[in-house]
Amino acid sequence: MCWADHTLGFIRPVRWVVALLDKVLLPLRLFQQVASVKTRGHRVLQRDKEIILTRASDYVDVLRQEGQVLVDYQERKAKTQDVIEKAALGSGQALICSELLEEVVGLTEWPIGILAQFESSALSLPSALLTTVIATQLKSFPVKESTDNLCPCFVVVTQVAPEDIDTVRRGYERVIRARLADARFFLEKDLTIPLSARLPALKNIIFEKALGSLHDKAQRTAALASFIAKAFAVSEQHSVRAAWLTKCDLLSDVVTEFPVLQGVMGAYYAEQEGLDSAVCQAIFEHYLPRFSQDELPVSPVGKVVALAHHLDTLVGMLSVHGVPSGEKDPYGMRRTALGILRILMTMSVPISVRSLLTQGGAAYLPAVISPEVIENGHAFLLQRFAIWQQTQGYSIEIVRSVLSVMEGDLNCYEASARLQAVKEFLSCTEAQSLLALHKRIHNLVSSYSVAQKSAIDEQLLVEPTEQAVYAALMQTESNHSLALQQGDYLTALRSCLTLNTPVAQLFDQVMILDKVEAVCANRLALLGRLSLLLNKVAQLSQLSL
C-alpha cells in the first residue's frame, strides 16, 4: 500500500526504520523516517516498548526476549501450531488447515491459543458447513474427537494480555452464536426448495458469454455423461441425473455465502431429498480434481460426471479462447486437461480421447465447435499427457516413442500400459542389442524409402540366413499379435527378442544391397516388415542406445 505522498509502497504504514550493518548505523531515510537503532516490542503485550539494538545479528533474539515478537516466520509458524494443538488438547484434536494456518501466522506476532465453546445443538449442522463457518468467518480452528466427530468448541489464535483472554473468549463465543444461527437459517431455507426446482433459474446465470448459461452447460454435461456412462458400463440414469443437478446448489443461500462449499452442499441437499447415494456422491465429485494434486473422483458415476463436466469446459473454452500459449492460462485449461487425463487413467476400460472430444463438441452448434477445435483439443491433450508422464518418471524419449504410434488417437489407459512396458523392457541387456539392430534396420528402410508393408517373395530368399530371419519373423508376428490383442505389451516386446540372433547373422553374412535388383528389393522388404513389427508398441527407432 501507499500512503501520504509516498511513491514507495509497503504492506503497512511505516512508523520507524532500523538500518544496521553489524554495529554500524546506516544513514538512511525511508518513508520519511530516519533510520535509527531503536525498534519496538509487541504493540499490545509490550505497549510499544522501545528497544535499543546494538548489533544487527541480535535483532531476532532481542525482539523475542524483550519485545514478545517472533520475527522468524518458521519459528512463529511452529509456535502457532503448537499453541493451537495445546489449546485443543483437553477436548480433542484441532483440525489445522494449512492455508488458514499460513494466514493466521501472518496476522500474529506472539500467538496465544484460546479454546472457545458453542452450543452442542450446532453439531446437527453439516460438518463441512460448521467447519467453514469457524474457519472463514472467525479465522479459527475446529476441534474433533478421536472418532472424527466434531466437538462443540474451536481454537482462536490471538495476541492479547493474559488478563484479557476471558474477554476475548466470550467475544468469539458471542460471534459464533450469531454466525451459526445465520448458517442454520440459510440451510433450512435451502432445504425447502428441491435441487431440480432450481434448474430453470440456471438459465439466468452465464457460464461463458459465447457458450451460454449454466443451464446450457448442465444440458451438455448430461448428454456427454450419457455417452460416457454407456462406454464404461456405468448407470446412465444416475449419471444423467447427477449431471443435471451439478450446478443447482450455486443458487442456494449457503453456497452464495460460502462459495467454497459448492458441490459439497449440492451432495448434502440431494441426500436430504432422498436421491440415490451414487447421484449424491457424483454431485460432489464432479468438480474433482480442482488442482493438479487434488483427489480424484472414486465412484463410477462420479468419474463419469466429472469427466463430462471437464470435457465440456475444455472443448468450449478451446473454441472461444484457443489453446493457451506461454505461461498465460487465465481459464485454467491446462489444469482442466490434466484433470481429464488423470480421471481417464483410473478407468480400466480404454476409450478414445478423440471420440470424447468429438462427442463433447457434438453438444454445441457446429458453428461453435469446428473440426479444427477437436484437432487442437486432441493435440493439446497429447502435449499435456507427455508433460505429465515425464513428471511420473518416464523419459521424454520413451514418452515420444509411445505417443508417436498413437498420434491419431490418444488412449490414456493404453498409453500408460505401453509406457510401463517399454520402460521395463529397456532394463534388460537383450533389449539394448535389439535397439542397435533396429537402428540399422530403420536407417536402411528410411534411406531406400521401403514401404513397410511390401510383399516378401519367399522364392527370392535364397540365403539360409535370410530364410531363418523370415521364419523367425513369421513366428514372432504371430506371438506379438496375440500379446497385443490381450493388451500385454511387455510380452509383445519380449517376443521380439527372438529376432536378435537371426537378424544379427543376417547383417553379418548377407549383403542386403545385392547387385540383383529383385533380390535387393526383397531383402529391403524383409527389413521393412521387421521395422513395422518392432514399431507397433512404440517407435523403438526413436530411443537412444
Image (cartoon, grey):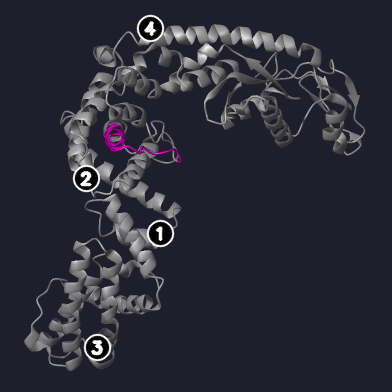
Q: Which residue is mark 1?
A: 396
Residue at (74% x, 11% y) in the render: 166
User: In the image, what residue type sits under mark 3?
Assistant: Leu
Which circle, 4 or 2, is nearer the viewer? 4
Q: Quadrant of the C terminus?
A: bottom left
Q: Quadrant of the N terminus?
A: top right
Q: Is residue 370 visible?
A: no
Q: Are marks 1 and 4 in contact (CB under 8 Å)?
A: no
Vertical side of 233 occupied by 145: above or below = above
Which is nearer the eye, 491 or 452?
491
Which is nearer the eye, 520 or 392?
392
User: In the image, what residue type sits under mark 2?
Assistant: Arg
Side (left or right) of 335 relative to 367:
right
Q: Secondary structure at mark 4?
A: helix
| Label 3 crowd bin: few (<14), some (14–19), many (20+), radius 10 Å | some
Q: Is residue 244 magenta?
A: no
Side (left or right) of 477 relative to 381:
left
Q: Which residue is mark 4?
A: 189
- Span colored in magenta: 293-309
Residue at (12% x, 92% y) in the render: 462
